[in-house]
Image (spheres, helix red, strand yellow):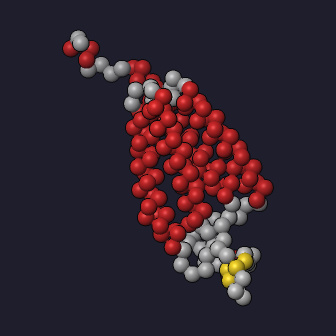
Amino acid sequence: MDPRTASVPNPDRRNRAGPALLLVAGLFLLAMVATWSLLGPQRAAVSLDGEPRQVQDDAFYDYAARVPDAPRPVELAVGAVAASGALGLAILALGSRAGVASTTGARLVGTGASLLAGAIVGYGGRIVTAGVVGANIGAGLVLFFGVPLTVALLVVATLVAARR
């Protein structure tokens, strides 16, 4: 290798990192929105007379965090669009040369890590905002296990996307 050109960065690598990182971010965000929207609001079943059932009165439930209610058809439509977008971006990431890495295995790892991280955040968000009676233990577990796992998955996806 010529020592004069050894320190010159590969311009092809620099040009591919940007679109690949955008694919990682897009996959993450679309998977998060699709999971959140398609799951819908969660409420704990309440046993008032020995028979578990859903209570529609929000004042009955305790919330770790509240989110504004959206009409269910709107949530389903947003979820369907986000799921379609995530599927399209996943196909693009797996088939494109500017995708999530240079080999098919690395592209699969980067794409899967991005999608899984988004799904964890979307599902965890529904758990944190779920209506419960008493303490929301699930919210604590999501924060304790979900946040580090999501960060680790996003680091893996970013590293795979940035490398050639």
Q: Is residue 111 visible?
A: yes
Q: Please tell me whether residue 163 is drawn above or below residue 139 in the rendered image.
A: above
Left-right relation of 39 to 5: right
Q: Residue furthest front?
A: 50
Residue drawn at x 67%, y 76% as measured from the top left: 45
Name the residue rendered at 54%, 44% in the picture: 115
- Farthest-out residue, top: 2
Residue 34 percent coordinates (x, y): 64, 49
Q: Residue at x 44, y 33 (%)?
A: 106
Residue 59 shows up from this direction:
no
The quadrant in which the N terminus is found is: top left
**Could you tell me which residue is drawn at 68 percent across and 54 percent down?**
38
Q: Which of the image's four quarters has the C terminus? A: top left
Residue 60: x and y in percent read 68, 81
For this orientation, the residue located farthest to the left is 3
Residue 27's x, y, as percent? Answer: 56, 41
Total number of numbered labels? 0
Q: Quadrant of residue 84?
A: top right
* Residue 54 in the image, given as x and y percentages of width and height: 72, 75
Using the image, determine if residue 27 lies above or below residue 68.
above
Image side of residue 48 versus residue 32, left or right: right
Relative height, residue 40 to residue 31 (above, below): below
Query: Is residue 111 shown above or below 57?
Result: above
Residue most toward the right? 73
In this rendering, position of residue 54 left or right of residue 11: right
